[in-house]
Amino acid sequence: MTPELADETRKTLGEDGNKFAAYALNIRTYVGDKWLKGAGYYPAPRLRLFLRDRFRYEEACIHPRAFLEGETGPLLKNDVLHYPWKDFSELIRKMNRETTLEAEKWIEDGRKVTLAKTLRKAFHRFLKYYFQRGGWREGHMGFIMCAFHSLYQFLTYIKYWEATERKDGAGRR
C-alpha cells in the first residue's frame, strides 16, 4: 500500500464510517519491475477493502468467488502495488500449481471438458486480452502475458485429460 493510498483510506473511512460494506481499489500489477498496463491488468478494480462481517469468499482452492452483503463505496483513486512474480520463471511455477488446482476443481465439479472447447476458449482468451483489453499496447510483454492467459486454459485441460481420460492407459506403450 502506498502512503497516498493509506492516507486516502484513512480519510475515506473517517468520512464514511461503516456506511459502505466495501471499497474497490485499482491493482497495479508488476512482473519484476515492469508495470503491466495492458491485457486487462490496469485499471483492474477489485474489492480489497471491506468489513469482515459483510464479505466472504466461497471455499475453493483456486479462484474463489466473493460475496458481499451491502453497498460498495466509490473506487479509491490511489493504487495497490502488486508484485506477484519476480520474473517469468516464478510466473510459470505459479501457473503450474494453479492449473493443477484448476484441473482438480473441474473434476470435482464434474465438468465435461473437450479439447475442441478448450482450444476455442484458449484462442478466444488470447484475442480478448490482446485486442479488446489492450495487450498489444504492451509490445512483447503484452503478447507474452496474453499468451499466458491462453496457455492457462490449455495446461489445465492437459492436466484434466491426464487425470480423467488417460488414467486407464497411463504408463502403457
Image (cartoon, rainbow, N blue to C red):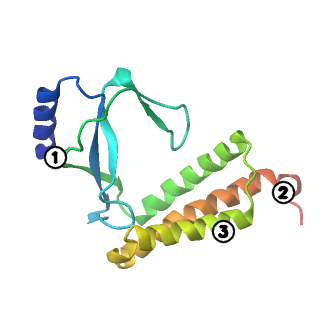
Work out how far the residue at label 3 is from the one at label 1, CA to CA, in angstroms.
40 Å
Q: Amino acid at mark 2?
A: Ala
Lateral position of residue 77 relative to residue 153, left or right? left
Residue placed furthest toward the bottom: 139
Q: Quadrant of the N terminus?
A: top left
Residue corresponding to mark 2: 170
Lateral position of residue 121 relative to residue 169, left or right? left
Q: Amino acid at mark 3?
A: Leu
Work out how far the residue at label 3 is from the one at label 2, CA to CA, in angstroms.
23 Å
Residue placed furthest toward the front: 71
Residue corresponding to mark 1: 2
Residue nearest the viewer, comparing 168 with 36: 36
Residue 172, image x and y in percent? 89, 61
Q: Residues within 10 Å of mark 1 (few under 14, many from 20)?
A: few
Q: Residues within 10 Å of mark 3 (few under 14, many from 20)?
A: some
Q: Are marks 3 and 1 in contact (CB under 8 Å)?
A: no
| Residue 119, numbered label | 3
Work out how far the residue at label 1 is from the one at label 2, CA to CA, in angstroms.
51 Å
Dividing the picture into quarters, in which one does residue 53 lie? top left
Dividing the picture into quarters, in which one does residue 47 lie? top left
Q: Quadrant of the C terminus?
A: bottom right
Residue nearest the viewer, comparing 108 with 50: 50
First in sequence: mark 3 vs mark 1: 1
Callout 3 secondary element? helix
Q: Residue shown at 53%/65% (left/top)?
A: 125
First in sequence: mark 3 vs mark 2: 3
Lateral position of residue 92 relative to residue 69, left or right? right
Q: Amino acid at mark 1?
A: Thr
